Image: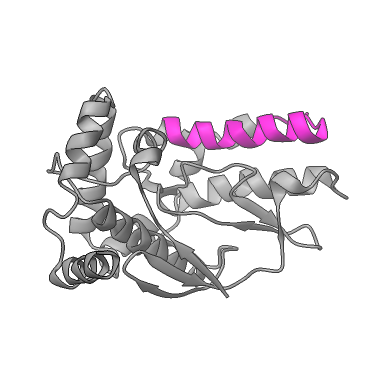
Amino acid sequence: MVLKLHRLGRTSFRAVKNKRDYLEHRKNFSWLYLSRLAAKKEFAFMRALGEHGFPVPEAIEVNRHCVLMERMAAYPLVRVRNLGNVQDVYRQAVGLVARLAQHGLIHCDFNEFNLMITEREELIVIDFPQMVSTSHPNAKMFYERDVRCIVDWFHKQYRYDDVDDAESHFSFETVVGRSAAGLLDKELRASGYDKECEDTLEDWRKASHGDSGSSEEEEELSNDEEEELPELERAALDVTKLEVG
């Protein structure tokens, strides 16, 4: 098994804020609270995708900012220099981007770092906190970026160019028009990943895109780290401070 710890800190603020949906209706927030939301979102999406037959690790448990998942017998695609059948793996990759969209979801970070490959050259998708619905205002841009990341990686790493132009075949309008009967974005809102949580993450994304990311603002965020923490999380922080002191 693998234990993933979500930890958003001040040093990662600028890098994370521009691509992950983490806080709505708030200007100040706690990194612990933010990390807990990220873990909750990842667990819910990973579990739902697995239940619908997507090649993802099994989601086992989530607690605060920690997600326990299945350990896959696979390697990060970014570390694989040679493939037995480049075309087949490429088609798997762009096909997964399209299949996610047909189920109402955009990965938003679909690249060689978030794909794993087995000995049989079967792909596994990981990392889900940044996923959005196909109804998101920027869904088309996120979708096309995911496809372009795959096209560029296979050209750069494996010198592969799709002569059949799968990028055009899997256009956003075409794929979303073939949406599956059960859209996962809607199912998730009625299950473990509630609307309030999604709204919170979406507002954080909007707020972060609109700001300058100045050091002064980061200091303000840091000073308000404990605002609106659930009682158990606040108690855990208090215990930690006593132990350190």
Horizontal side of 170 relative to 197 (left or right) equals right
Residue at image position (26%, 61%) is 189
Residue 10 occupies quadrant = top left
What's drawn in magenta, residue-wise? 141-166
Q: Is residue 168 above or below residue 119?
A: above
* Residue 186 visible from this viewpoint: no
User: Which of the colour schemes (rainbow, by chain, secondary structure, one colour) is used?
Assistant: one colour
Q: Is residue 189 visible?
A: yes
- The x, y position of residue 171, in whole percent, is 54, 33
User: Residue 126: image x %, image y %?
Assistant: 55, 56
In the depicted view, which residue is nearer to us: 219 or 177?
219
Q: Main secondary structure of the magenta part?
A: helix
Q: Is residue 162 magenta?
A: yes
The answer to whether 167 appears left or right of 35 in the picture is: right
Residue drawn at point x = 60 percent, y = 42 percent: 111
Q: Nearer the viewer, residue 236 or 142?
A: 236
Which residue ends up furthest to the front in the rendered image? Answer: 245
Tell me the residue at 19%/50% (across/down): 225
Question: In the rendered view, would you say 91 is above or below 168?
Answer: below
